[in-house]
Image: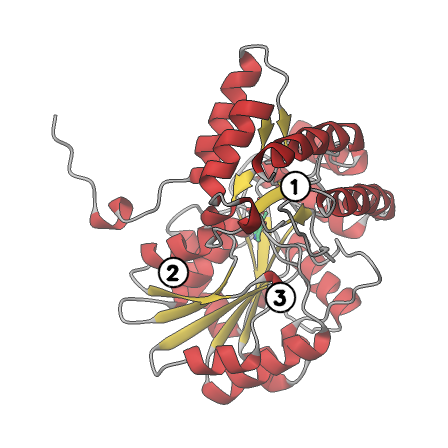
Amino acid sequence: MNYKISQRAASLAPSLTLAIDSKAKAMKAAGEDVVGFGAGEPDFDTPQHIKDAAAKALAGGFTKYTPSSGIPELREAIAEKFKRENGLIYKPSQIIVSCGGKHSCYNVILATCEAGDEVIIPAPYWLSYPEMVKLAGAKPVILTTTDKTEFKVTPEQLRAAITPNTRLFVLNSPSNPTGSVYTPEEVKALGDICVEKGVLIMSDEIYEHLLYDGAKVKSVASFSQAHYDHTIIVHGLAKAYSMTGWRLGFLAAPEPIAKAIDAVQSHSTSNPTSFAQKGGVAALTGSQEHLPLWLAEYDKRRRYAHAKLNTMPGITCVNAKGAFYLFPNISKTGLKSAEFCARLLEQEKVAAVPGIAFGADDYIRLSYATSLANIEKGLERMDKFCKALVK
Ligand SMILES: *Cc1c(COP(=O)(O)O)cnc(C)c1O
């Protein structure tokens, strides 16, 4: 059969992350001792009170359709979160609960972008952004950054990239894959330009709570009414509450955009899973005591990994101030990222994600959402690998 694949689907880049991941899994299944740094999710369990709330809802028959944009109780809890933690006032009607933060991003792009529109995305980027932009028929415009600026775009860079067709600027701080965090002043400077030029900002704040070394974040929406009016915040429960499999994300937007996204969602997925939403309410309104414990653990691993990486021949690594990734520079080893990762897996049984997947071929991504013992073992092996490469 000669199946016709739509141009839309055929234009998507194949996932390099998945290719390495499936090879690592196959090696593991064959009994090999693989150390994985590929994880894009916390290694902790979802806190018990959140699971209990969902289990109770399920047992009690909360199993039917809910309003497409989420149950009022959850949208209110999210509005309350923005008020309490960010000083931002949103009405529940400005909040849309979706099937994961990724789904929230996709909804934003679908509801605001179309053919002829440009979307500015700083690289290294979360690998789904450019593909989502392409799915909407719009054009990703990539702004390259390096470790010299801690992977942050400068206001000059952003200004130079804006054209009359620019519709959206994607800001992700703390960042996946680099762990870099923009200071409030830096965020404001970028926001000022978007306000001046009439460009919307999609601010992906999913790692908001995962910060180290006293780093502070401030949402771009919070600097003025004009900043608020130009911003759509994308967020979710996956990272701070270890709820990746629950598929719960949310966004906060100016009313007309929220309305448009509501329409998109109501004709595609409809509501996120009913009883998962009850778990979401428990996450946002219940105890937050797990978070400092997790952060202390992540921080220990981050410090160890950062120091160790900088002792390896051919490797330099700026420290991350957020999320749970490090993004070491491998350019002095003489290998490009895909070959580096393929050989590292083959020779030393260590799985990492090639930077080219994030638009940055001189780097690899290591997730420290895995035990310190694993990190020690994996980095010893990587050290051996680099010593053999760089004589
Ligand atoms: C994990 C992640 C998300 C959202 O993930 P979901 O599992 O869909 O909630 C969004 N943006 C970035 C940058 C992420 O790393």
Residue 316 horizontal/vertical position (percent): 66, 52
On screen, 358 above or below 199? above
Residue 206 horizontal/vertical position (percent): 64, 55
Q: Is residue 321 left or right of residue 365?
A: right
At x 64%, y 60%, the residue is 205
Q: Which mark is residue 110?
A: 2
In this view, which residue lies farthest toward the top? Answer: 31
Q: Amino acid at mark 3?
A: Lys
Tag 3 residue:
148
Q: CA distance from mark 1 to mark 3?
A: 21 Å
Residue 389 horizontal/vertical position (percent): 57, 36
Q: Secondary structure at mark 3?
A: helix
The residue mark sitting in front, 1 or 3, is: 3
**Pick the front one: 168 or 370:** 370
At x 74%, y 63%, the residue is 80
Q: Quadrant of residue 113?
A: bottom left
Q: Quadrant of residue 89?
A: bottom right
Q: Secondary structure at mark 1?
A: strand
For disc 2, the neighbor class at 10 Å (few under 14, some 14 to 19, many from 20) is many
For disc 3, the neighbor class at 10 Å (few under 14, some 14 to 19, many from 20) is few
On screen, 89 above or below 128? below
**Pick the front one: 281 or 194:** 194
Tag 1 residue:
367
Q: Amino acid at mark 2?
A: Leu
Q: Earlier in the sequence, mark 3 or mark 2?
A: 2
